[in-house]
Amino acid sequence: MEQHSGLRTEWGETIYRQKYAPNELEKWGDRASIIVDDICGTRGGTETPLLAREDLDELRQLISSCTVMPGGRPIYYAGRDYTTAFLNNCYLLRAEHDTREEWADLAWRAISCTMTGGGIGMDASVIRPSGRTLSRTGGISSGPMSLLEMLNDCGRHIMQGGTRRTAEYGSLNWQHGDIWTFLRAKNWQDMPIAGAFNEDGTPFTVADAKRADFNYRAPLDMMNISINYDDAFLQYKGMPELFVENCRQAMRTGEPGFSFNFGEKSNETLRNACTEITSEDDSDICCLGSINMANISTIEEFKAAVRLASKMLVCITIRASVPYSKVREVRAQNRRLGLGLMGVHEWLLKRGHRYEMNDELKQWLKVYRDESERSANVHCDRLFLSRPKGYRAIAPTGTISILAGTTSGIEPVYSVAYRRRYLSGGGRWKYQFVVDGTAQTLIDSGIKPEDIESAVDLAADPERRIKFQFDVQKYVDHAISSTINLPEWGTPLNNESKVEEFAKMVHKYAHGLRGLTFYPSGARGGQPLTPVPYEEAHAKRGVVYEDNSESQCLSGVCNI
């Protein structure tokens, strides 16, 4: 009989067994103890503990109850070979010079990072536009798109653990000479394949080929992309044509996203793959963990969880292995922490609040802001470390929130029920029907499934999503990774006639955001989560199905 790990939901149990448990006997409580000992304790008696005994005991309980959740890398690597304990989630890279030496070195850095299991993000704005003369050789510049495609192919061939495709991010400044090419780089539906046609006689496009064969090469198919907007954008009278077109793209295909870098943050154009960590320094690294607000009843308990989670992240900056020396040097200098939140929507629902800012949430977020900085600084001072340059970042926490059985990041419940596609260890696509754990808890308490507001419902009101992110960003010094769902392009609520209105709405909040990402329903095909009726998912949950459909993941990072 299979051992139960003590997690809240069956789906969380399944994910734990598939991705994190080193053997069939280990329970989640066992993993919590290993995480605490390896990251903050004695590492099996070989090192000096980094936390006091009472803190170790309390942190162990908080992780065991899924109140404090480390990032995926610490959960996986804790207790394994210390020399390869890559506890950090993602790496931030910058093309610092437009030279052949830098191109070669950047490819080496990207490969070194992705082979640790972390994702990468890269800003290519320094690369000269295509077609420029190269002074040393007399040749012609190929431009930033060639560099991004080169890194994209690095990601194509690195499969982490045999199941998780490399997560990549690329960005370019809005005034770059090649920005319009970048803007439309992933419009695969507009790229016909010569001599190929569908049965109805329409051109067979790259998007069609990608659906038929997931491994078909498509431009930047392993990479999420965003356009960098700086202070010059805020000073522009009206809305630049490029920005309006970026909004049209967001409504139509979801990419590129928006990266906002203003004032004292104007140089922080680097992002990790999911965009919540920001930096201006090449080879910076992010260190993630989250507080599960849904598991906490009082603001005093919340403060204690923030205190210990912040200390845990400081410990990760000491214990984690890194792929090369520059990462170690930048980490010692910046020591960026990314303490995030999850279960925010469940917290709101339990208190009878709508998905929007309110006075009680403001009080909790103030504690989150102040205590994360205070406790991290105290712990760094105690250990004679540099104080962090950043403390808080809200990650999407997709898989981790499933483990905890709550809503991810600041996201609303995606859907009461959905079908989830994933890549199995054998390299085959499979799917399961899932009833959202938070939704099921609310349903069990007597709330009707149709009365639970979800991201699919809020797709009809994107301004509420944007404003909520805008309000929470005031308490976050890095960024927030949140994908705002939209109706399918060409439908009454999302079409060409709505572009100007949508652009004005995004422009209205841009000054107070660090980034925005949108996803129109069905934009990339083969999306990992597809809403289904509650009754269907409830009847079929727990059964694993082989996915033999032609529709495959087209975004590059579908195995959430």
Image (tube, helix red, strand yellow):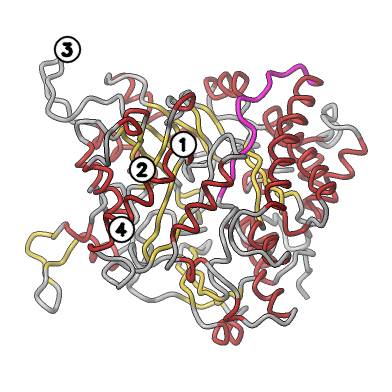
Mark 4 and mark 2: span between their CA atoms?
13 Å
From the viewer's side, name the closer residue of 24 and 474.
474
Percent x, y for residue 438?
Answer: 67, 69
Q: Secondary structure at mark 4?
A: loop
Expressed as whole percent of the image width and height from the top left, the position of residue 325 reads: 55, 20
The secondary structure type at the circle numbered 2 is strand
The residue lying toward the viewer, choosing from 210 and 132, is: 132
Amino acid type of the residue that numbered disc 3 sits on in the rendered structure: Arg
Per the image, the residue denoted by label 3 is 136
- Considering the numbered disc 3 on the image, is that residue within a helix, a strand or a loop? loop
Left-right relation of 211 to 447: left
Majority secondary structure of magenta residues: loop
Q: Is residue 306 left or right of residue 492?
A: right
> Quick one: label 4 or label 2, which is nearer the N terminus?
2
Specify the quadrant of the image occupied by residue 216. Answer: bottom left
Q: Name the residue tied to disc 1.
A: 271
Residue 262: x and y in percent read 43, 30
Is residue 86 in view from this perspective? no
Amino acid bearing label 4: Thr
Give the magenta part as a residue range. 383-395
The residue pinned by badge 2 equals 226
